[in-house]
Image: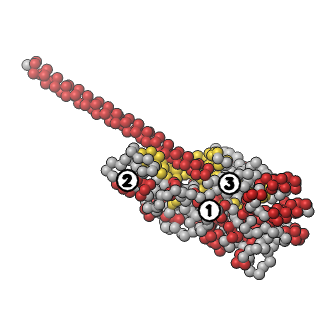
């Protein structure tokens, strides 16, 4: 009887051992598969990162070729959309996506060819057509398109923020603006509704107000009353598009969206701390500063304006040198544009029957009245000459780029009515690259009159040195992607990164394959300025 009983006992033990071995083997296989999947994910993430960084290098190369030519990089899908980094079996010249302008056929394949790409993306917040909730562009954004938080006047900050905060249904607008101004000013004087050390020292943990310039726009989150909802509004993934979750009330995050069908983007997209430019001409040479002594000016004019390529006529040069000999104070001019008095302006750009105002005193106006400078010479005058009080190594900060700034920012310039802002936006859409190089096009197109031109010239530019760059690296055969943003400054041909942030946790966000939003079927030709 012992033999059968012993067999009956051994069988369950064997079955249990086999089960444990099977369970161990299953766990081991699961572990191996998980490790393999994790390794593949890490490799794909690295590949996506390298693809995105390739996009940054493409941007840098474009800026070296066309440093101030916005038409080459502001909205250039042929240069920045679905650009191939590497593929198994073909290169950029034979890339089927480059030929068709769409990835639809590639993605529809049962087994897409392994390929890594990048897109340089930006939202179209400048679009005056009212379709900014549904469109994106493929390009970069000059920081000079925005209002510089550190150099804007209190009136400009208030004029920009009031309507934006009202759109966000913020009730304490005045307190927020006062707290912002208290943070950046150098004193400890408390504005009504503002905040100084007496408030910040009561927080947990306590800290002191900056009492100085902002280092980034995100620094506003340290200022009393400001929150991510104010900085970015309903646009939680920061793509400039009204996504379904941003228009469904409290059904999903963000729970504070108002379900009105309009994207409230917050204040961050219209602010910067980076915009500045050196007092140099388009070819990166120092401008001729008319506040220097006559001998130095004369020598520099002879070196810059060669007899073979004299862009400014001799009578103009003689006029400037004559003013120097007469001890004319060029420092009283707000900009070099005031040397142009508009004697040859077409009647259509001279405002009514009003007499054009001349800068400075009566004697100064009389001295400038004989100016021989013509509209044809004006672009070269604006590019080559300067009346700044000194040539600072830090350059001029806070100028607004009239070629790329949205209407909301243009409206902050002096003397600009909504009608004139509309004229500027309409006129710049038809500019050729050569005309767009200097602000002279404001007059040649009739977008503004001479008085307005003189009023806004000290505050505007058409050049760009700092850029907001956002790049997505992704694949045709994988779902992996990486999304990064940089603020980059071009110092001659050298690119310097001023700010970097990994936006991958916010999602792909930009619908690079959506034909309605991204404009499938675009021509992928060779971009140029």
Q: Which residue is mark 2?
A: 106
Whichever of callouts 1 and 3 sits on the residue coming sooner in the sequence is: 3
Q: Residue at x 38, y 57 (%)?
A: 104
Task: Give the side of residue 21 with respect to residue 364, left or right.
Answer: left
Residue topped by disc 3:
275
Mark 2 crowdedness (10 Å alpha carbons): few <14, some 14-19, many ≥20: some
- Say which of marks 3 and 2 sits in front: 2
Identify the residue at the far top of this view: 2
Residue at image position (59%, 67%) is 429
**Compared to 423, does 520 lie above or below?**
above
Q: Quadrant of the C terminus?
A: bottom right
Say what secondary structure mark 2 lies in: helix
- The label on residue 433 is 1
User: Which x, y percent locates residue 344?
Assistant: 76, 74
> In the image shown, does 506 or 371 lie closer to the viewer?
371
Earlier-in-chain disc, 3 versus 2? 2
Q: Secondary structure at mark 1?
A: loop
- Front in this rendered view, residue 77 or 273: 77
């Amino acid at each position: 009887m012992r033999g059968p009983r012993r067999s009956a006992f051994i069988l369950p033990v064997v079955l249990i051992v086999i089960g444990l071995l099977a369970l161990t083997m299953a766990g081991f296989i699961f572990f191996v598969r998980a490790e393999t999947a994790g390794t593949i994910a890490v490799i794909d993430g690295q590949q996506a990162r390298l693809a995105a960084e390739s996009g940054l290098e493409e941007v840098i190369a474009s800026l070296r070729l066309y440093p101030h030519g916005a038409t080459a990089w502001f909205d250039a899908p042929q240069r920045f959309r679905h650009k191939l980094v590497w593929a198994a079996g073909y290169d950029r010249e034979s890339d089927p996506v480059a030929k068709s302008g769409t990835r639809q056929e590639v993605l529809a394949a049962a087994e897409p060819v392994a390929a890594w790409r990048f897109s340089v993306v930006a939202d179209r917040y400048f679009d005056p057509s009212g379709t900014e909730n549904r469109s994106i562009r493929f390009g970069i954004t000059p920081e000079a398109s925005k209002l510089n938080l550190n150099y804007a006047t209190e009136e400009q900050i208030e004029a920009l923020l009031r309507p934006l905060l009202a759109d966000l249904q913020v009730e304490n607008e005045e307190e927020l603006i006062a707290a912002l101004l208290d943070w950046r000013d150098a004193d400890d004087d408390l504005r009504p509704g503002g905040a100084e050390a007496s408030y910040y020292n009561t927080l947990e943990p306590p800290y002191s107000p900056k009492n100085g310039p902002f280092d980034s726009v995100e620094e506003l989150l340290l200022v009393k009353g400001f929150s991510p909802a104010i900085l970015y509004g309903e646009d939680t993934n920061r793509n400039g598009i009204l996504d379904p979750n941003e228009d469904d009330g409290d059904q999903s995050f963000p729970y504070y969206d108002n379900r009105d069908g309009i994207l409230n983007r917050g204040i961050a997209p219209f602010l910067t701390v980076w915009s500045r430019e050196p007092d140099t001409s388009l070819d990166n040479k120092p401008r001729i500063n008319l506040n220097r002594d006559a001998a130095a000016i004369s020598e520099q004019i002879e070196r810059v304006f060669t007899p073979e390529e004299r862009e400014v006529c001799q009578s103009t040069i003689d006029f400037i040198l004559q003013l120097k000999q007469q001890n004319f104070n060029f420092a009283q001019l707000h900009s070099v544009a005031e040397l142009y008095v508009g004697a040859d302006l077409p009647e259509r750009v001279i405002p009514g029957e009003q007499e054009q105002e001349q800068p400075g005193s009566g004697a100064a106006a009389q001295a400038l009245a004989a100016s021989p400078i013509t509209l044809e010479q004006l672009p070269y005058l604006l590019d080559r000459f300067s009346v700044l009080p000194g040539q600072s190594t830090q350059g001029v900060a806070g100028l607004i780029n009239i070629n790329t700034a949205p209407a909301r920012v243009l409206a902050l310039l002096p003397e600009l009515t909504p009608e004139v802002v509309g004229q500027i936006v309409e006129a710049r859409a038809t500019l050729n690259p050569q005309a767009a190089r200097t602000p002279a096009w404001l007059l040649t197109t009739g977008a503004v009159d001479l008085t307005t031109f003189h009023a806004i010239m000290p505050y505007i530019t058409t050049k760009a040195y700092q850029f907001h760059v956002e790049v997505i690296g992704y694949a045709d055969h994988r779902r992996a992607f990486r999304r990064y943003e940089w603020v980059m400054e071009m110092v001659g041909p050298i690119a310097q990164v001023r700010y970097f942030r990994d936006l991958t946790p916010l999602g792909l966000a930009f619908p690079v394959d959506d034909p309605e939003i991204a404009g499938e079927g675009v021509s992928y030709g060779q971009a140029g300025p």
